[in-house]
Image (tube, helix red, strand yellow):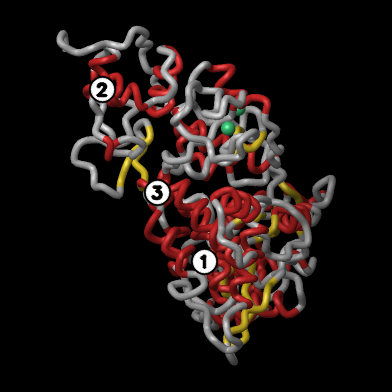
Amino acid sequence: MSDAVRLVRHPAAKTTESLYGYILRLTEENGYPDWSSIFLLANIPRHERGTAHIQVSQLAEITNQPEQALELIRYTSPGMSVVRCRLLAHPLAVTDLRLKTPQICPDCVEEKGYIEAHFDLSFMMGCPIHQKTLLSVCPKCLQPLSWARPALLQCHCGAFLPESTRTSLSQPEVTLLDIIRRRVLGEPDRVYHSGLPTRELQSLTLDCLIQLINTLGRSASERSTADLVGQEQVVKSATQTLDEWPKRFIQHLEQLYETLPSGESLRMTQEPFHKIYWLAAVRIRPQENADFLRNVLSDFSALHGGRFFSGRASQRKGAEHARKFISIREFARQHCIAPRTAARYVDTGQIPSVASNQGNVHRRLIDSRCATLPLKDAGKIYRMENAAKLIGIPLLVLRALKANGEFECRHLPNILSGLHELDVASFIQRLLSLAPTPARDHFNTIETIQLRDITRSRHGLYSPITVKTLIIQQLLSKQLPVIGCVDGTPGGLLISVKDVQTCIRDNSAVSRDRTVPVTRVLRPD
Ligand SMILES: [Zn+2]
Ligand SMILES: [Zn+2]
């Protein structure tokens, strides 16, 4: 290092600086007409100049700084394939960099005093800070900007670059470019108020983010224009497709679908969807970062009778999005109702659905994210076991009462397995209202039994479920009088033992045949 010729002025490179921007800064600081003087001094071979494969060891020598400092901003690392490169620490395809014809935001360069690395990206068509397009053509000589110029803000023709006029960016473009800029420079993520899926975009690596913009932008641009698609158009089209997520993306898929010959079935792996499929299924890693794309594609595919991932994204543990469109049978399974009941709700429009047509097969799918069972009133739904405990009667008795209509389901369709809290409360109230206030006079003179002694009985006269059910039915129909209530609960209802026994004897069918299969009265349908 001691034998090397050093530059007179050799400021250190910034950690977020463009490497070629740094060489141009050295050119300007030392008063050279263009960067070729630096290359000569650093003995950098001609074939490396202006490419991603430039070596930095001799550049480090003439600027008197450790080689590692320049390795950080170098475009390649040892052992990298010729088609790959990197920008700061981010691996990229070599075509993702725009090194031959640079572009800058003169305002940023003026404020910072150096060119930041993100301007080396092909897709960086604007500055999110100043919300304007970048400068890539000299406003005076109208030539593409070149690194072979005397200063950061001066063209080789002498024009002062900040005096150029640039067009404004749309807000979604600003957001997308800001996400890219932060990703390149390693700045922390932020919250945006935007129609773009910003949280999902911020989770992607720079490489995946660029792939996404490239795929969506080209897919949308090729459809709308026959012209050669420029990088700027690709970013604009990608932004429009990602905006109002996922509405515009679905519209784009629908437009692609319309280009299929009629009668041809949808296959995501074939034209015109295969590039988007490849992006979502293969290219974006880790896989869950592509879920926001995969879920939309899965729903779209299901709507048109195709198959895409078979909902694997939604089944993956921790996946945030559930699969949107499901079959009627699947909806019925999820809500523990009979498929024909779900089908009836769909037919009557109580559950919203969409038509799915493929060839001659027409079926309806339910949007699982907005479809709910048509409850008459909002409220808690008890499982049958819990409702039975709350009322203080055995589960089988409750089922029998529900089946024969003694338990009224006014707030929830009685084909469902649960019970609405209002129906449970009203049933308890109905039982309690049977007790006279004050209790009957002969309360203390006759032998009585509490209802809970009957419902809990496991042996003897009261043990069969049919007997327990009969007694509650007789109470509700007031054929079996209630004398009082000891504790304000249905279990505390007091009944005359003599009356109970008479009731059982009178309903001899019950008492004679204690082996009546309970299930016969328990099945609702
Ligand atoms: Zn700027
Ligand atoms: Zn010029």
Work out whether residue 517 or residue 31 is closer to the camera in this orientation and state it.
Answer: 31
Position in image of residue 165 (x %, y %): 70, 33
From mark 3 to mark 1, how far is it between C-alphas? 31 Å
Sequence-wise, the earlier of marks 3 and 1 is: 3
Is label 3 in a helix, a strand or a loop? helix
Please say whether residue 417 is visible from this viewpoint.
Answer: no
Mark 1 Cα-neighbour bin, 10 Å: few <14, some 14–19, many ≥20: many
Q: What residue is pinned by disc 3?
A: 95
Position in image of residue 145 (x %, y %): 53, 36
Which one is closest to the eye, mark 2 or mark 3? 2
The reply to whether dot 2 and dot 3 touch (C-beta < 8 Å) is no
Q: Amino acid at mark 2?
A: Ala
Q: What residue is pinned by disc 2?
A: 42
Q: What residue is pinned by disc 1?
A: 298
Question: In the picture shown, does residue 428 fall above or below 53?
Answer: below
Question: In the picture shown, does residue 100 fall above or below 301?
Answer: above
Residue depicted at 41% across the width and 56% down the height? 316
